[in-house]
Image: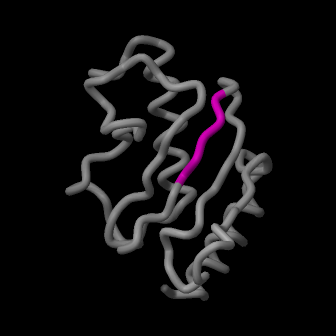
């Protein structure tokens, strides 16, 4: 795990007003040297609580994003996680802010009935 990258992502999230309601949490039961023990929680304008979990192989795989309340849509989901990006479209240059922004777009499209556009 690259601690400098995590610090950079935290700074980036703090600079952007749209992420002001997001907080980084870590699972204190495990070592802090693994990406998958970190996740962002935040409240969206749609009143969905979003959880963005880092995968073990981050940044080579996208964050796992789930919503509460859950969306009643099964075509664009994998379990409780929304499919906000195709895995082959993910880039290691993307960050948590990118994933959360794409999730916000997903929610907007879901609410307006435009997910398949």
Q: Residue furthest left?
A: 88
- Quadrant placement of the C terminus: top left
**Can residue 29 be spotted in the picture?**
yes
Image quarter of residue 15: bottom right
Left or right of 102 in this view: 43: right
Query: Where is 103 relative to 69, above or below?
Result: below
Rendered residue at 74%/56% (across/down): 23
The residue range painted magenta reads: 48-52
Left or right of 116 in this view: 8: right
Rendered residue at 59%/31% (across/down): 68
Residue 12 spot, x, y in % from top left: 67, 67
Residue 35 spot, x, y in % from top left: 50, 74
Query: Where is 104 relative to 37, above or below?
Result: above
Tell me the chief SS of the magenta region: strand
Rendered residue at 26%/25% (across/down): 75
**Can residue 117 be spotted in the picture?**
no
Image quarter of residue 16: bottom right
Left or right of 78 in this view: 22: right
Rendered residue at 66%/68% (across/down): 26
> How many numbered marks are there?
0
Residue 21 spot, x, y in % from top left: 78, 46
Query: Where is 7 relative to 102, above or below?
Result: below
């Amino acid at each position: 795990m690259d601690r400098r990258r995590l610090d950079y992502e935290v700074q980036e999230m703090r600079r952007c007003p749209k992420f002001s309601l997001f907080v980084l949490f870590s699972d204190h039961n495990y070592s802090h040297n693994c990406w998958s023990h970190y996740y962002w929680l935040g409240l969206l304008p749609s009143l969905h609580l979003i959880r963005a979990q880092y995968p073990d192989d981050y940044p080579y795989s996208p964050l796992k994003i789930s919503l509460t309340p859950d969306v009643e849509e099964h075509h664009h989901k994998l379990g409780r996680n929304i499919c906000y990006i195709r895995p082959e479209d993910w880039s290691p240059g993307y960050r948590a802010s990118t994933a959360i922004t794409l999730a916000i777009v997903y929610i907007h499209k879901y609410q307006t009935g435009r997910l398949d556009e």
